[in-house]
Image (cartoon, rainbow, N blue to C red):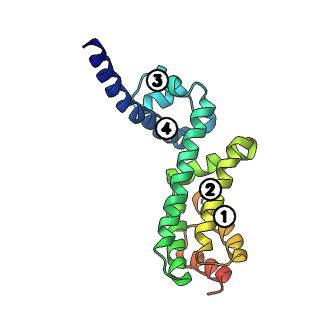
Amino acid sequence: MGNRTSSAAQGNQGSRQPDRRRRIVVACLSVVAQYGVAATTHRKIAAAAGVPLGLTTYYFARLDDLLYAAFAEFASDGSASFADDLRAAASPEDAVTVLVAFILAGQKRGNAESVITHELYTLAAREERFRGITQQWMHANRAALGRLFDEDTVRMLDPLIEGLTIHGLLGVSEPDADLVERAIRRIVRL
């Protein structure tokens, strides 16, 4: 009987563990969005996740490993969402509409996803381990664009999307749907 109780307790604990680990990863991204990578700590992440500090270090002994897991999940989710949005486009013309909406959403001030993205880019510029995440993300996004556009167009369009998002997010100019659409159309020749 002791073994049955022990197995049941382990089973319950095991079923909670993925949820706790996931909460920690999600909290890490929230902390990065609020404070930046440089000010992210296990303590802040534990508080944001509502878990004991020791649990964050149990799952991720090094903060670098937690950041890697969080950014890898974030990039994977981001590229999957981008591909899903583009899958709804039946033609390059439809894709222009999707891309304009995508860029304008990324330009909104206070957009946590855009802030997290740029934190990842900064980290990837310094640390090769994180560069692998950004390279996989870019490859996935380019593959999604490649369903509708030729390779040269994709190679021009991908950095345009990033650049317009950055400029809008940083307030270089107010988001301008007409300008974004015209820029995309020039590249895709529509």
Residue 24 position in % (x across, y down): 46, 34
- How packed mark 1 is, by other alpha carbons closer than 10 Å (few <14, some 14-19, many 20 or more), is few
Q: Counting residues from the N terminus, which is met first, the one under dot 2 or under dot 4? A: 4
Q: Secondary structure at mark 4?
A: helix
How many marks are shown on the rendered structure? Answer: 4
> Disc 2, disc 3: CB below 8 Å?
no
Residue under the point 48% across and 41% down = 30
Which image quadrant for residue 18? top left
- How packed mark 2 is, by other alpha carbons closer than 10 Å (few <14, some 14-19, many 20 or more), is many
- Going by the numbered disc 3, the residue's amino acid type is Leu
Q: Please say if 8 is above or below 173.
A: above
In front: 12, or 28? 12
- Going by the numbered disc 1, the residue's amino acid type is Gly
Q: Nearer the viewer, mark 3 or mark 1?
A: 3
Disc 4 versus disc 1: distance between alpha carbons? 28 Å
Q: Secondary structure at mark 3?
A: helix
> Disc 1, disc 2: CB below 8 Å?
no
Residue 55 is labelled as 3
Disc 3 versus disc 1: distance between alpha carbons? 38 Å
Give the left or right position of residue 48, taking residue 169 as reference: left
Disc 2 versus disc 3: distance between alpha carbons? 29 Å
Where is mark 4, residue-wise?
25
- Going by the numbered disc 2, the residue's amino acid type is Trp
Residue 137 is labelled as 2
